[in-house]
């Protein structure tokens, strides 16, 4: 199960939209920062194929300026 963590940066002026977009994705969680308009985005997919599909969906979101990966782990060998 791939688990990924990212720092999520919005396009200027689109923080709330980014927050809603990321929080609505299946098998994902968005944790807002307390003092900045950024957040932590965590995905926990069941397979590499599911992770690839999620990555394609994320690329379609126009509210995201940047996702900086901070952690990745997979139980698959």
Image (cartoon, rainbow, N blue to C red):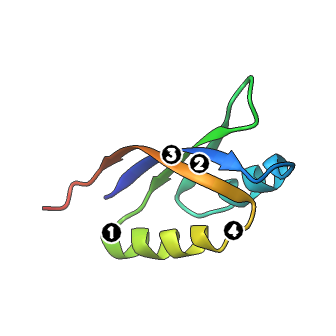
Q: Which residue in the protein does label 3 denote?
A: 6
- Badge nearest the viewer, 4 or 2: 4
Q: Distance from label 4 to label 2 (Cα)?
A: 16 Å
Quadrant of the rendering where the N terminus is positioned: bottom left
Instruction: Report, in whole angstroms, how far the alpha carbon at label 3 lies from the one at label 4.
Output: 15 Å
| Residue for point 58% across, 64% down | 26
Q: Which label was assigned to residue 2?
A: none
Instruction: Tell me the tag on residue 29.
Output: 2
Label 4 belongs to which residue?
61
CA distance for labels 1 and 2: 17 Å
Q: Position of residue 2 (x, y in %)?
A: 33, 57
Quote the CA–CA distance across marks 2 and 3.
Answer: 11 Å
First along the sequence among labels 2 and 3: 3
Percent position of residue 52, x then y = 41, 73
Q: Earlier in the sequence, mark 3 or mark 4?
A: 3
Task: Point out the frontmost of discs 2 and 3.
Answer: 3
Q: How far is disc 4 from disc 1 in space, using C-alphas?
A: 22 Å
- Which SS class for mark 3? strand
Mark 1 crowdedness (10 Å alpha carbons): few <14, some 14-19, many ≥20: some
Q: Residues within 10 Å of mark 2 (few under 14, many from 20)?
A: some
Instruction: Locate the C terminus by quadrant.
Output: bottom left
Q: Earlier in the sequence, mark 4 or mark 2?
A: 2
Q: Quadrant of residue 35?
A: top right
Contact (CB < 8 A) between labels 1 and 3? Answer: no
Tell me what residue is drawn at x 60 percent, y 53 percent: 66
Q: Residues within 10 Å of mark 4 (few under 14, many from 20)?
A: few
Horizontally, residue 9 falls left or right of residue 26, namely right
Question: Helix or strand or loop: what does disc 1 sit on?
Answer: loop
Task: Identify the mark at residue 47; answer none if there is no mark.
Answer: 1
């Amino acid at each position: 199960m791939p688990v990924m963590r990212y720092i999520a940066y919005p396009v200027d002026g689109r923080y709330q939209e980014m927050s809603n977009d990321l929080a609505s994705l299946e098998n994902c969680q968005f944790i807002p920062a307390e003092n900045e308009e950024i957040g932590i985005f965590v995905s926990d997919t069941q397979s590499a194929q599911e992770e690839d599909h999620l990555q394609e969906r994320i690329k379609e979101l126009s509210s995201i300026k940047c996702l900086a990966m901070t952690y990745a782990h997979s139980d698959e060998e």
